[in-house]
Amino acid sequence: MTTQTQISFPTYVQMYPYSKDRPLAKQLREKVRYYTYTFLYQKQCRQLIEFLNKNPLWQSLFTQDYYRFNPLLTTYCDKRFSAPQRLSAITQHLQLAEEKWGASFCSTLLKEQVIPLSQLTEDLSLNLSLNFIDPFEGYFAINIRNQNNERIYDASFTFLSPNKLLIASMQGPYYENAQDLIKTATKDLQGMRPMFMLMQVFRELAKHWQCDLIGIPHKSQGKYRLSARSKILFNYDEFWQENQGVYQSPYWQLPLDIERKPLEDIASKKRSMYRKRYEMLDRLSDEIASRFR
């Protein structure tokens, strides 16, 4: 008979394994935050551990990287969430993911960390993966990568009860040649910028998972800081409006269908590009349906 593994909330050293290599001032800040928050939110820490011990499927998400416990203490997807709301959002997200994807798919995702969803072009692939950028913005992400495994664009998300799919972040590449990568990807995607391709992916996923699609308001985004707001180049509110979103507090409501331009209304010199784009989007829709059938 196999004994079920029991886990406990991580120690400071487990959550910050590289802290000893950082400047002393940063170590001190991290220690103060860890011990203050684990004291203030000890009830939520205990309840999350109880949830994971009752639902061992999700234990490895946190034991692979103990820093993934940190969103419970500080920020999870929406800066407005209180500690009880963060706990609720995290546990409901994991429950809904298992409900919509199935335990087998979830187990594979946790083991492989990346699951291909579609080969968009000869060079670009679409993937569902763990969020490797920042768990404060969600534990899972949709991303586009090229054959060199360079990240072209990532978008993290979370499920919110009862049936909402919240897009929590949109992030482009951080390489020196980032602009060249975006330009090449846009050309390969038949004139669609990668961030707009990801929006189309979310529409398809939301329809298949039977969710309302919503977007995080700019000032509620996980990384928004008043002290660094001048450095934030991407404005979420403007982006949701570009995608026909309507703000209905507390989130942007995003449509699941965007009307296509009839080919006969498109200038002849661009008609071939749009035809190929529509074929690519139709193929994407079929592949997503097949993957999650």
Image: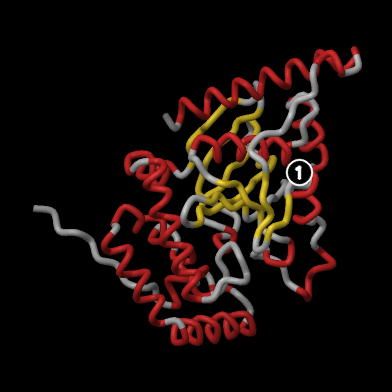
Q: Nearer the viewer, residue 219 or 52?
A: 219
Q: Residue furthest front?
A: 248
Q: Residue furthest left?
A: 1
Q: Left or right: 22 with respect to 271?
A: left
Q: Left or right: 73 with respect to 282?
A: left
Label 1 Cα neighbours within 10 Å, binned few <14 / some 14-19 / many ≥20? some
Up-down relation of residue 140 to residue 69 (above or below): above
Q: Left or right: 2 with respect to 78?
A: left
Query: Percent x, y for residue 80?
Result: 62, 71
Residue at 52%, 25% (x, y): give it: 287
Q: Looking at the rendering, which quadrant does residue 243 occupy?
A: top right
Up-down relation of residue 216 to residue 226 (above or below): above
Residue at 61%, 65% (x, y): give it: 78
Q: Left or right: 256 with respect to 41?
A: right
Q: Nearer the viewer, residue 226 or 27?
A: 226
Query: Percent x, y for residue 269?
Result: 90, 14
Q: Nearer the viewer, residue 66 or 255?
A: 255
Residue kind at label 1, given as amino acid type: Gln
| Quarter of the C terminus within the rendering | top left
Residue at 40%, 41% (x, y): give it: 101
- Colour basis: secondary structure
Residue at 46%, 44% (x, y): give it: 113
Query: Percent x, y for residue 124?
Result: 65, 29
Q: Nearer the viewer, residue 199 or 152?
A: 199
Query: Percent x, y for residue 174?
Result: 73, 50
Say how many tags the image has: 1
Up-down relation of residue 42 to residue 176 (above or below): below
Mark 1 residue element: loop
Reading the image, the residue beneath label 1 is 244
Q: Looking at the rendering, which quadrant does residue 222 occupy?
A: bottom right
